[in-house]
Image (cartoon, helix red, strand yellow):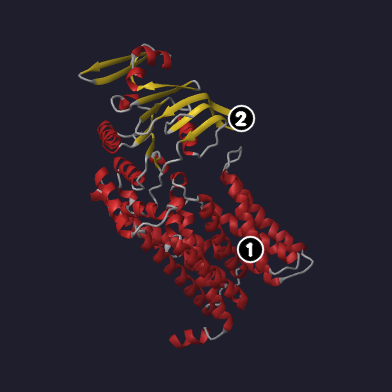
Amino acid sequence: MMRELIEMYEYAFMRQALVVGVFGGGLLAFLGVFVHLRRIVFLGAALPQITALGIAAAAVLHLPALSGALAGGLAGILLLSFTGKPGHLPAEGWIGIAYATGGSLAIVLMAVSPHPDAGALRFFTGDILGTSRNEAVFAVIAALFTAVIFRLFWSQFVVSSFDPVMSATLGIRVRLWNALLFLCLGFGLAAVMNSAGSMLAFGMLIGPPAAALMLFRGFPAVIIATLIFGALAAFVGLTFSFWFDLPGGPAMATAALFPVFPAWLLHKFRA
Amino acid sequence: MSSSLFEFQNADLGYRGNLLLRDLSLSLAAGDFLGIVGPNGAGKSTLVKTMLGLLPLRGGRMGWRPERPLIGYVPQREQIDAIWPLRVCDTLRLTLSAMDRPRLRRKDHLEDIDRVMRATGIEALAHQTLSTLSGGEMQRLLLARALVVRPRVLFLDEPTAAMDLFSTERFMDLIAGLHRDEGLTVILVTHDLQSLAGRADTLGILSDGVLHHGPADEMLTSERLTRVYGCDVRVERQNGTCFIKAHAAGKDAPT
C-alpha cells in the first residue's frame, strides 16, 4: 500500500493537486474558524460563487483564470461588506442574491464565451487534477502570507472579531483587521476555486472548523485540529479519488465534511 | 470649554435624519459617577456611542479634556458571543496584547490580569471558557476586561440587565467600590433607577429627547421624578437608603 501511495504521488499533477488541497484547503479551513465564530457562514457560501463569476469573466476576456478568481473574490467581499447596513432587505437576502447571481451568471458567461476554455469549467466539476504548478505555488504563497499575518497580529484579529465595539473604544483598528482577514479569505478562495471549484472551497471553509469547534474548547486546540482535519481531508480525498476514479474536488470536500458527523455525535454524548 | 473631563455643548445626537437628543449640554468632572436612565428608545445607547466616538455628533460641540482618556467599555452581556473558544484569562490577555500601544512585558500583562481578576472576584474562573460562565460571571469578566487596560473612564451599558437582585446589588457595589477607592470616572447606563440610588453622584434621566440631569440627591425626589416621567413617582428614604416606586395606571409598579 505504501508503495502504491509513493507511486501515486510520483506524478507531478498529483503532487500539485495535493499542494493546493493541503495549503489552499488548509488556509480556508483555518479562516473558516473565524467564519463560524463571526456567524457569517452564509457569506462563506456566497463568496465562492462570486469568485466563480470572476473566473468566468476572465475566461470571456481571455485573461488568466487566477486573476479572475482574485478579482471576483475581492469584489465579492467588498460588495457583501455593505450588506450589514440597515435597509429594507436583511443581510441574508443580499447574500442569497449574491450566491444565486454569482453561480448562474458564471454558467451563462461560460456558455457565451468567445474563448471556450474547458479548464475554466473546473470551478463547477472540481477536477483538481488539472492543477498547474503556478496554481500550486499561488496556494502555498497565500497560505504562508496568511500564516505570517496571523502569527504577527493574532490578538488583534481575535479581539476585533470577538467584540468590535469594545475594540474600537480601545483604539484597535477594527476596519484594518477586518480588511486583512477578508483579504486572506479572498486569497484562499482564489487559490482553491481556480483549481478545485466551489464545492471544495466551501467544504474546507465549513467542515474542518465545524468539527474542531464541536470537539475542543480552547482556541489553540481548535486551530490545530482544524488544520489537521483540513490537511487530512485533502490527502485522503485525493488518494481515494485516484484509487476509485472519483472527481478530486468533491472527494476532498466529502472528506472535509466527514469529521463533522462523528464530532457532532461526540459533542452530543459529552453534553 | 471649562476644565471638566467631558462636555456636551448644545449637542444634537442621533442618526442621519433621526435626531434623538437635541440641544444637550452636560459636563462631567474627573472622578464623577454619572448614572443615565431612561426607557427603551430614549437614546441611551445613542448617547453612549456618541460619547465613545462611535457615532458622529449631529450638531453642537463635544469634547474630552485635555484629551480623550483611555476608556474601559463594558457592553451589554447579550452582545458577547459565548461560542468563542476563549478562556477567561485568554480574553484578558488578548485584550492587552491587541491594544495599539507600546507592548508591555509579559510579566506586566500577568500582573494586570491577576489584579483585575482579584478585583472582580473571578480568579477561580481563570481557565473556564466563556460558554461555561453564568450571566453574573460573564458580566464580571466584561468588567475585568474593561479594567485590565487601566482606564481612567469606565463606561457600562446596562450591566445588570437580566441579572437577579442579589447579583445586581453585588455588581453595583463592585462598581461603586472602584469609583470610591480608585477614583475611576464611571458612566453607567441602566433601566434600573433604584440601583443607582446612593451610588451615582450625578444622575441623567432621558425622557422625550431631553436629558434631565443634576446631582443625584436633587434628582431623586418625588416631585422631580414625577415631572420627568409624567406619572406619579414616590421617593422614600429610610435609614439612608432610597426607595423609588412608580404608580402607573393606578397600580404600584417597581421602577
SS state under label 2: loop
The answer to which image quadrant residue B244 occupies is top left
| Whole-percent x, y for residue B99 in the image | 42, 52
**Are callouts 1 and 2 both on one chain?**
no
Q: Is residue B255 visible?
A: no
Instruction: Residue at 25% x, 17% y: name it.
Output: B237
As shown in the figure, which amino acid type bears the numbered disc 1?
Leu
**Circle 1 sits on which residue?**
A70
B235 displayed left or right of B53: left
Q: Is residue B133 above or below residue A211?
A: above
Instruction: Residue at 49% x, 60% y: name it.
Output: A31
Q: Chain of mark 1?
A: A
Task: In this rendered view, identify the residue nearer to me: B29 or A261.
Answer: B29
Task: In this rendered view, identify the residue nearer to me: B231 or B61.
Answer: B61
Which label lies toward us, 1 or 2? 2
In the picture, the disc for residue A83 is none
Instruction: Residue at 67% x, 61% y: name it.
Output: A54
Q: Residues within 10 Å of mark 1 (few under 14, many from 20)?
A: many
Instruction: Residue at 70% x, 56% y: name it.
Output: A105
Outermost residue to the right: A114
A172 displayed left or right of A95: left
**Circle 2 sits on which residue?**
B17
As shown in the figure, which amino acid type bears the numbered disc 2?
Gly
A18 displayed left or right of B104: right
| Whole-percent x, y for residue B115 in the image | 26, 48
Q: Is residue A40 above or below residue A138?
A: above
The quadrant the C terminus of chain B occupies is: top left
Q: Chain of mark 2?
A: B
Marks 1 and 2, Cα distance to the nearest angstrom?
Answer: 38 Å
